[in-house]
Amino acid sequence: MLTFLARRLASLLVTLAVASAVIFAVMEVLPGDPAEIMLGTNARPDTLAALRANLGLDRPATERYVAWVSGFLQGDLGRSYTYSVPVGELVAQRLWVSLPLAAISLLLTVLIAIPVGAIAAARRNRPVDIGIMAATQVGIAVPNFWFAMLLVFVFAVSLRLLPAGGFPGWGAGLWPALRSLILPAVALALPQASILARVMRSSLIDTLGEDYMRTARAKGLSRSEAVRRHALRNALIPVLTIMGLQFSFLLAGTIIIENVFFLPGLGRLVFQAITQRDLIVVKSVVMLLVASVVIVNFLVELAYAAVDPRLRRRA
Amino acid sequence: MSAVVAGRQGLAARALGHPSFLVGAAISLVVAATALLSFVWTPHDPTVLDIGRKLQPLSAAHWLGTDQYGRDVLSMIMGGAVTSMAVSFVAVGIGLGLGVPLGLLAAGRRGPVGEAVMRANDFVFAFPALVMAIMLRDIFGPGALNAMVAIGIFNVPVFARLAYGAALPLWTREFVMAARVAGKGRGRITLEHILPNMLSLIIVQATIQLSLGVLAEAALSYVGLGVQPPAPSWGRMLNEAQTLMAIAPRLALVPGLAIVVTVMGLNLLGDGLRDLLDPRLARER
């Protein structure tokens, strides 16, 4: 297990290093000079040069790359060109919206998908199963931002039960803040839950047919006991993998949904930064997003290896 | 030879008796036909603004009414089908064209070359299409090309993993051994024996990636990273309809339904093709 861990960790670090180099290089070749954007096109050349020196833009690219990465590792993400505050602070503020949103929708996804998938598997090919499968087929096809608009129309505009958008901040109290995250979280969760429920169903159907299930029944366990003790646990392995893969969709979804509900999260931040050409913000947020995808998949792989010893040897 | 013909006939007969394949194929054909038809005919020009006719309800002149700029909604939906199909087809083309050869190369070479190819794929997987589109926006400019490339790059590792996973076990099969004994090179074996044996898997995956492409294009256009005005796009129609939900919900319902129906059609087609082309997989579901 230790050598497996060491090898996976090494490959994780290499991936992150390459990702940072790629992101830096892409941002380097982008047209447009941040100093010119900050000062406008009428700025005097010597003012421009002074600002560029101040921002460190006159140093060679390799030097700036090393400075960016070593700063990143120490939690210093640089200074935003437009907000004139440390990017780390901006990101930390925004994370307090994006992370709870992602966490709530992940929780909803699991709470919906696992029981629904299990029920469908248990009632395989009966009307309940066919109904669930048809519903998930629709759920997969619905774009989350459109679903979000429909939710706003029904629950905010027509019924006036929940806010249509915006975020009061956690300082306004737990309930007002949570209330404004309910619709976005549901909009994110339902399409994801549809996919996961289908995975859960087919995975449980597979394990129900395994020899060890027959053995469990033969040694006297009731059907529900055998399902609970043996089938469910094994069925969760593929579900876990798919959840890891879904994480990047969840992230992308969060960014888009924040724009539907005008939530001041990372997604809004990155879109504002793009239009204002605040490249240091774009660069750092993109790096954070990519790093989180890589790390989550690494953790899923570890969890997977912990459950299934055969995988440790293969890697 | 006769066995092959019998197999084909059997396939056609099974296709006609497979409801999800039939429904999926019918929907996909209708969407494709709508897109093609819009090249030669739409009820109105989808790009012409006519403020005097804004927000008109459904009528004989405007079957699906007009939007806040007086554009004909049906014409925009038809034009949007072209955008949707074009972006997702090109994106799948990029994924197929780069991913399948890479996966085949990794499986044929294995060793360090294979390892390097698959590691590079894992790496690309860490960049969701949206993040890719954000990064590439300033290189290609926001537009259809940006969406095509961003979604296309995301498709590459999908097809590379698929081709790699399917090709590895094929390399140990008797007919490949026989071909090697007969003196065929790796490249020729890949083309003549490996690739034909995994075509059905690739076709099924391509259908699934097409439907994901339709969703991704809509999302990118919705946030302004995809197709730009005046070219019609379902995602941008939804963006423009958002503030009008209370007075004209129809403007948000129609493009949304177009996306849902198209994606469902492609998914059903993919499920059907998987059942028809690979009976082993069909049994499990």
Image (cartoon, helix red, strand yellow):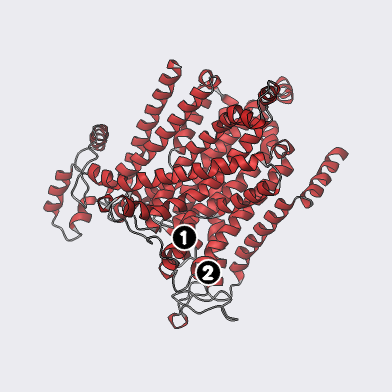
The one of B41 and A290 positioned closer to us in this rendering: A290
Q: Residue at x 70, y 31 (%)?
A: B193
Residue A153 percent coordinates (x, y): 45, 65
The disc at residue B97 is none
Relative placement, left or right, of A94 versus B202 is left
The one of B68 and A308 positioned closer to us in this rendering: A308
Q: Residue furthest bottom?
A: B52
Mark 1, secondary structure of its residue: helix
Three-letter amino acid code of the residue under disc 2:
Met
Relative placement, left or right, of B277 versus A268 is right
Q: Dot 2 surroundings within 10 Å: few (below 14), some, or many (20 or more)?
A: many
Residue at numbered disc 2? B76
Contact, CB < 8 Å: mark 1 with mark 2?
Answer: no
Residue A269 percent coordinates (x, y): 31, 51
Subunit bearing disc 2: B
Residue A132 percent coordinates (x, y): 62, 49
Mark 2, secondary structure of its residue: helix
Q: Residue furthest right?
A: B2
The one of A312 and A32 positioned closer to us in this rendering: A312
The disc at residue A151 is 1
Three-letter amino acid code of the residue under disc 1:
Leu
Residue A196 visible somewhere in the drawing: no
Residue B164 sits in which quadrant?
top right
Q: Is residue B95 above or below residue A144?
A: above
Q: Is residue B63 above or below residue A127?
A: below
Residue A65 percent coordinates (x, y): 27, 36
Residue A133 visible somewhere in the drawing: yes
Residue A206 sits in which quadrant?
top right
